[in-house]
Image (cartoon, rainbow, N blue to C red):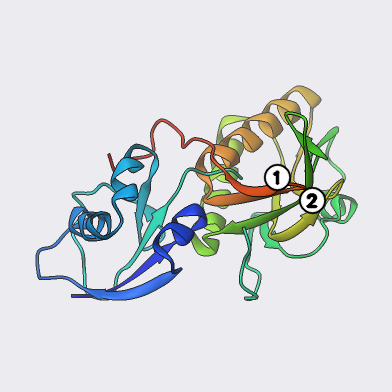
Amino acid sequence: MHVQVLFFGMLKELVGRSSEEADFPEGADLRAVFDRYAARHPRLREMARSIVMARNHEFAELSTALQEGDEVAFLPPVSGGTAAAAPVPEICDNGSFFALTRHAIDTRQLIARLLTGAEGAVVTFEGTVRNNTNGRRTRCLDYECYEPMALRLMARIGRELAAAHPIARIAMVHRLGRILIGETSVAVIVTAPHRRAAFAAALEGIDQLKKLVPIWKKEHFADGEVWVEGAWDANVPVAG
């Protein structure tokens, strides 16, 4: 079976490539894919408890069977690097909006897009780039993501929030590429009849985005750079 294998974030640097095509025998599963690359790059085995595998844009257990033409991805811990210049995806869902962008995020424009006139509250969360981490001076950030999977998960989070809270609409937009100090990297906006539901949904939305959406961050300091290693949600299946 012929499959496409993708690597993101720190794993891309570890294996020395972002993707390659590979062949596996009939009946092979994701464990066979992981084991092949872990044999070539033992550090993958050491990191297995924080690596997640995806098949065709969905989280998957290692026991998941491969099919001809599958796209398999090795995903390091989310941290919320540098993306290729590709069309920026977006999803519109019952008035809600989910997108990835390589341009500045305009929250006023997003709010105007969501409003219908029936809202009593609009809550906006903006994540901005700070100038230091634990006293170490930050120069800029690079964000990279697995775009089709990230967008699908953002829309799913939005639908789940709408089902769990009495809100009207929600927007989630994440910036990709290089971002400078003070710029907005992510925005979550919620409209609702009442403020309490809007605040609760906005907080839950950014928390879920940080734990579930495959986005990675490289932080550039005055004296070096590092991929920021966060943590997956406890319900996401890891490789080890």
- Vertical arrangement, residue 60 with respect to residue 229, above or below: below
Say whether residue 59 is left or right of residue 3. Answer: right
x then y, percent, for residue 182: 87, 46
Amino acid on which disc 1 is placed = Ile
Count of number-bearing discs: 2
Outermost residue, front direction? 223
Q: Looking at the image, which is closer to me, 197 or 218?
A: 218
Q: Looking at the image, which is closer to me, 128 or 46?
A: 46
- For image coordinates 68% across by 30% down, the residue present is 203
Residue corresponding to mark 2: 114
Kind of element beneath mark 1: strand
- For image coordinates 44% across by 55% down, the residue present is 11
- For image coordinates 61% across by 47% down, the residue present is 226
Amino acid on which disc 2 is placed = Leu
- The answer to whether the residues at label 2 and label 1 have Cβ atoms under 8 Å apart is yes
User: In the figure, residue 99 lies in which quadrant?
Assistant: bottom right
x then y, percent, for residue 29: 17, 58
- For image coordinates 57% across by 31% down, the residue present is 164
Q: Residues within 10 Å of mark 2 (few under 14, many from 20)?
A: many
Report, in whole angstroms, how far the alpha carbon at label 2 lies from the one at label 1. 7 Å
User: In the figure, residue 122 lies in which quadrant?
Assistant: top right
- Vertical arrangement, residue 204 with respect to residue 101, above or below: above
x then y, percent, for residue 212: 50, 42
- Vertical arrangement, residue 161 with respect to residue 39, above or below: above
Say whether residue 174 is left or right of residue 78. Answer: right
Residue corresponding to mark 1: 170
